Amino acid sequence: MKIILVIGSHPRHIYFANQVIDQFSNTSVIIEDRGPMLKKVNKNLNKLDKDNLIKHFKERSRAEYKYFSKSKINIKSKKNLLYIKKLTKESSKVIKLINIRKPNILITFGCGVISEPLLSKLPKSSLNFHTGLLPYFKGTAGNFWPYYFLKPNYIGITIHRIEKKLDGGSIIHQSVPKLSKSDGIHDIACKAILKGVADLKKNINK
């Protein structure tokens, strides 16, 4: 089984990759630099919104280090590890690795949008590990909006096929974490990833 992972660079993404590598040693990893969790705050925001934004991302950072730490990629061969700055601008590097490795499965998590010419070069079994339950919460921050709309039971993970329509591919599997009264927004988001990764490892051979 040959696998290529295309992931972001935050602790959740590194954890995800290491879990797959532990079970499937013939795995290559492409890491897209997602930058710091808290990017520059818009100067036009009022003080309350600015303070809340900073607080939100600081708490997210603490939660990710708590649940996932910031360990290095557990990959033996540097030939199977590729760092890129921007997926859309460096898709040729990804295509080259796909042509060399000829993976059975490609899985994305936390990277930029897959578009042409890369899209048509993906293997038949190409999946996205989406934070959020589709079709209810598409796009980014799929496990933030359920909290915003007071629907925490819609927090989870969707594994779906990568197709041209963003987050529109057929659903392979969905996972939901066990909710606890003591969970905050970032705790349950991290628990969703833990559950989703565990389910992915069980189902990937299928």
Image (cartoon, grey):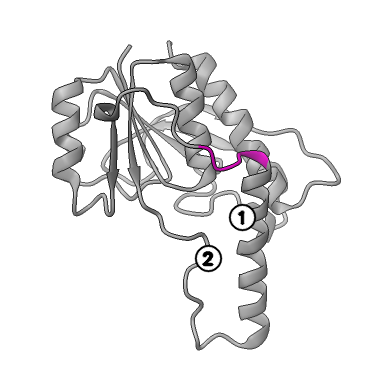
Please tell me which residue lies in front, 181 or 186: 186
Q: Which residues are magenta?
A: 67-71
Indicate whether 62 appears above or below 44: above
Residue at 48%, 18% in the rendered image: 22
Q: Secondary structure at mark 1?
A: helix
Q: Position of residue 158 (x, y in %)?
A: 51, 34
**Disc on the earlier residue, 2 or 1:** 2
The residue beneath circle 1 is: 61
Q: Nearer the viewer, residue 86 or 132?
A: 86
Residue at mark 2: 38
Residue displayed at 67% across by 73% down: 52
Q: Is residue 82 left or right of residue 50?
A: left
- Kindly report the secondary structure that dominates the magenta region of the rendered protein: loop
Q: Is residue 7 left or right of residue 61?
A: left
Q: Amino acid at mark 1?
A: Ser
Amino acid type at mark 2:
Leu
Q: Residue at x 28, y 17 (%)?
A: 104
